[in-house]
Image (spheres, rainbow, N blue to C red):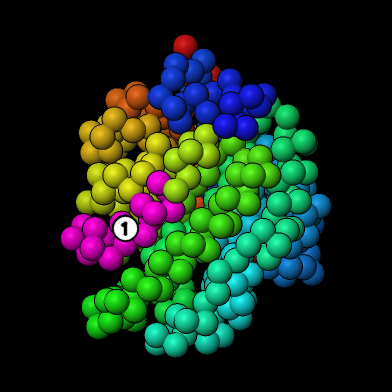
């Protein structure tokens, strides 16, 4: 409700999320704040990832860097999906080149019981960072985010990143009730984390279920959808668009839309015109292959134009990569892509 009166309201990004007419297709990049930027590497020197997420002024600076450099249409809060889990007392680290590593993986009902809820006081640095950012950003919307229960559960159960998610799936099949209890707790943590961000002034939220594509549609619907749906539907009255994203989700796009998203994020494997047909009249976000940035410019240009053309099949299109910016990406290429998206889509 609070969002309805803010100066970000008329932005191309929010209009596209709502399927309203836009002057040009808005663009931002997942992981736009990160190692592709020399200014990011400079300010992060000697400061651990989790520690960086807990310093509001540093979070503010890092979040603004890609907005200044690329003139993207939205900022995304610099944080990580495991920040609220760490705030809930789980001992973990984010290891460069690997990702989150959990000291004691969650494998039993007793482990699940130990996962406590969080409130605003546990993540007061996030509240502070968002308030600083909203002031600094003016008309540019700030996207808040959190990890979805399945992707968080996968890190907690595996103890770190996994290619097969074998332990996670074994847990799911062997102890479905305990699995649901775990996801229910994670859903409450995620919801509390997103509510802090909404109350502090973010203009949209993205729920990252990055690894949901490891599941069949049947298992997704049984084991995951009720929990993601609880998170997204509980935010229905927050007045901000809800983006729901995963990788390798071609068979899940319809179900992910049903989970309560306003916008469905699509990876590079599914053309946006096909995706638009599967997400039930919702807006789409994506989906340039993050590796296309390494191609010669004429190839990049063709691909950007194709993504824009495919995106016209949906009521709204937010241009993005199909997954995060790779650290080896040349930041100057990203800036050129932003300019091209804006000029090629101008109506
Ligand atoms: O610009 C943005 O998109 C905002 C920042 C952001 C980060 N993590 C910063 C980060 C966001 C939205 C995330 C979410 C996140 N974290 C996801 C979901 C998005 C996705 O990529 O699917 C996942 C799965 C994680 C878990 C995680 N954290 C991974 C896999 C890694 C990479 C490990 C590595 O070093 O390759 C991290 C660490 C991380 N999170 C970095 C950044 C910028 C790199 C750490 C560093 O710069 O030292």
Residue situated in front as seen by the camera: 262 or 292:
262
The residue under the point 47% across, 11% down is 347
Who's the residue at 62% across and 48% down the image? Answer: 197
Residue 162 percent across, percent down from the top left: 40, 74
Relative to 10, residue 238 above or below = below
| Outermost residue to the left | 218
| Rendered location of residue 305, percent (x, y) | 40, 27
Q: Position of residue 262 (x, y in %)?
A: 40, 36
The quarter of the rendering in which ligand 1 is drawn is bottom right
Identify which residue is drawn at 41% across, 73% down.
Answer: 182
Query: In the figure, 133 relative to 222: above or below?
Result: above
Residue 127 vs residue 213: left or right?
A: right
Residue 259 is left or right of residue 33, and the answer is: left
Asked if residue 97 can be seen in this view, the reply is no
Q: Is residue 60 above or below residue 345?
A: below
What percent of the width, then of the height, locates residue 67? 68, 37
Taking the spot 52% from the left edge, 44% from the top edge, the residue there is 205
Give residue 309's quadrant in the image: top left
**Residue 213 magenta:** no
Q: Is the residue at mark 1 in contact range of ligand 1, meaning its CB lies under 8 Å from it?
A: no
Predominant secondary structure, magenta span: helix
The residue wearing badge 1 is 226
> Residue 340 vs residue 199: left or right?
left
Bounds of the magenta segment = 215-233
* Crowding at mark 1 (Cα within 10 Å: few <14, some 14-19, many 20+): some
On-image quarter of the N terminus:
top right
Tell whether 198 sits left or right of 17.
right
83 or 267, which lies in front? 83
Relative height, residue 175 to residue 119 (above, below): below
Q: Is residue 124 visible?
A: yes
Q: Tally the marks.
A: 1
Tag 1 secondary structure: helix
């Amino acid at each position: 409700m609070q969002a309805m009166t803010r100066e970000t309201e008329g932005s191309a990004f929010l209009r596209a999320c709502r399927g309203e007419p836009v002057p040009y297709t808005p663009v931002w990049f997942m992981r736009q704040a990160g190692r592709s930027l020399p200014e990011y590497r400079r300010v992060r020197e000697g400061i651990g990832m989790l520690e960086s997420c807990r310093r509001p002024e540093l979070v503010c600076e890092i979040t603004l860097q890609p907005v200044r450099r690329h003139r993207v249409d939205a900022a995304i809060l610099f944080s990580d999906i495991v920040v609220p889990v760490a705030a809930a007392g789980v001992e973990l680290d984010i290891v460069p080149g690997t990702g989150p590593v959990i000291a004691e993986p969650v494998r039993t009902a007793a482990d699940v019981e130990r996962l406590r809820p969080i409130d605003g006081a546990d993540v007061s640095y996030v509240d502070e960072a968002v308030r600083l950012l909203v002031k600094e950003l003016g008309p540019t919307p700030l996207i808040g985010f959190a990890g979805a229960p399945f992707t968080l559960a996968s890190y907690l159960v595996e103890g770190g990143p996994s290619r097969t998610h074998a332990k996670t799936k074994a847990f799911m099949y062997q102890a479905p009730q305990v699995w649901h209890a775990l996801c229910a707790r994670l859903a409450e943590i995620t919801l509390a984390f997103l509510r802090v961000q909404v109350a502090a002034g973010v203009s949209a939220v993205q729920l990252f279920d990055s690894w949901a594509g490891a599941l069949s549609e049947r298992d997704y619907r049984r084991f995951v959808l009720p929990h993601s749906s609880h998170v997204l539907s509980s935010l229905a009255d927050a007045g901000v668009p809800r983006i729901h994203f995963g990788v390798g989700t071609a068979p899940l796009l319809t179900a992910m839309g049903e989970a309560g998203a306003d916008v469905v994020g699509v990876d590079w494997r599914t053309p946006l015109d096909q995706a638009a047909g599967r997400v039930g009249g919702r807006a789409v976000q994506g989906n340039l292959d993050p590796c296309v940035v390494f191609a010669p410019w004429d190839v990049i240009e063709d691909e950007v134009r194709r993504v824009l053309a495919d995106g016209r099949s949906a009521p709204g299109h937010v241009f993005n990569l199909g997954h995060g910016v790779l650290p080896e990406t040349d930041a100057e290429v990203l800036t050129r892509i932003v300019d091209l998206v804006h000029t090629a889509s101008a109506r």
